[in-house]
Image (spheres, rainbow, N blue to C red):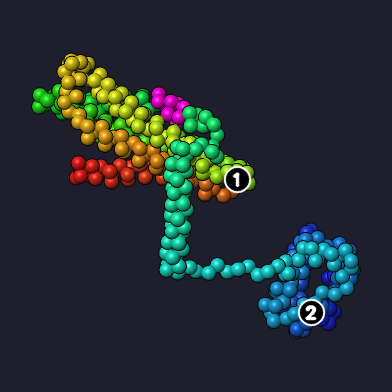
Amino acid sequence: MKIYYTDNILSFQGELTLHNVSYSFNQIRTILKQTKHELIILDIADVSRIDSSGVALLDHVKDLAEEQQKSVKITNASGSVKNSLQTFTSLQLPPERVPQRVSLIEKLGKGAFHVWRELVNALYLVSDSFYFAVVNLASRKGTRKGEFINQCIIIGMNAFFIIALISFLIGFILALQSAAQMRQFGASIYVADLVAISMTREMGPLITAILLAGRSGSAIASEIATMVVTEETDALRAMGLNPVRYTLVPKVHAITVMMPILTVLSMIIGIIGSFVIGYGYLGIGVQAFYGQVINALILKDILTGLIKSIVFAWIIVLVGAFYGFRVKGGATDVGHATTASVVAAIFMVILADSILGLLFYFQW
């Protein structure tokens, strides 16, 4: 590449490519500093070939000239060179938008609007779910035949073994930890009372809910989210079927039935776990332990656990469905929705447990 400068005309001869743009730019920059002319004409009639680097050089020359309050004009470009200039130039691109600073009031307003919108969507989902759950008791129109039994097996029976194992270990540990303190006061027999009340009022419903939130809640969220991503919910609407009624209502019915059953089994197995410690470590007989449990428990304790289990069941299924239906995007968003649903469901279950615990304590 050769560069000639005569008067205010800068002529190029040869190829203006990646291999010589650095050398050419140094020459041009020196010429621009020394010239007194306000208009510089770039004559590229003798440029045989130009690539994207050469076009970038000419664009940079224009910018450099503007900084020195000079103007540049390109002339005599051949057909192929003109096509390259039009293809690779960056001067025709729109200017980059400068991000504007958002005030604190605007951030708070945007956050409040987002929370309000999500709350409205959640209320729509809850109302649709309970409405169709009641309607489906009389008519199963709009749902798959046998789906209720299928969901009972998936949500309930398949979760029994993990719930039984965890409940046994929780009862075992509760009895073991409390036995060390009770023996100091000669009150070992009251280990049965402590574990029986804690398992029926708190630990049984809470353990079952947390395990189902991680197991069934995540499955509900991922299933519905996948249907949304693959446009199966849109297909259901096109066929005249309500996605909430078709996919969610059988799950609501199933978890409402199976959650109290699993909770009762969790209570019983947790008490059995405490009996292992009572019999093997404290020397409490079978009849004595059984009699102490029966005397300690009242109907209020069992009803408290059952009411909590139903509320927890509705929270798990509705939170999973909420995060599933709001997914937009692809497989990555399905994973994010599944994770968020588990975290939100466990948080809501613990929050509901605290509120219900206060209500039952002061009202009953």
Q: Nearer the viewer, residue 242 or 82?
A: 242
Read off the magenta span: 151-161
Which numbered disc, 1 or 2, marks the residue closer to the eye? 1
Q: Nearer the viewer, residue 69 or 216?
A: 216
Q: Earlier in the sequence, mark 1 or mark 2?
A: 2
State whether residue 26 appears in this view. Answer: no
In this rendering, is residue 149 above or below 25?
above
Distance CA(mark 1)–CA(mark 2) = 70 Å
Q: Dot 1 surroundings within 10 Å: few (below 14), some, or many (20 or more)? A: few
* Mark number, residue 40: 2
Find out whether the residues at labels 1 and 2 contact each other: C-beta distance under 8 Å: no
Q: Which amino acid type is shown beneath numbered disc 2?
A: Ile
Name the residue rendered at 29%, 28% in the picture: 267
Queried whether the magenta region covers residue 153, the answer comes back as yes
Picture quadrant of residue 131: top left
Name the residue rendered at 43%, 52% in the picture: 123
Q: Quadrant of the C terminus?
A: top left
State whether residue 127 appears in this view. Answer: yes
* Mark number, residue 240: 1
Name the residue rendered at 34%, 36% in the picture: 309
Q: Position of residue 242 (x, y in %)?
A: 55, 45
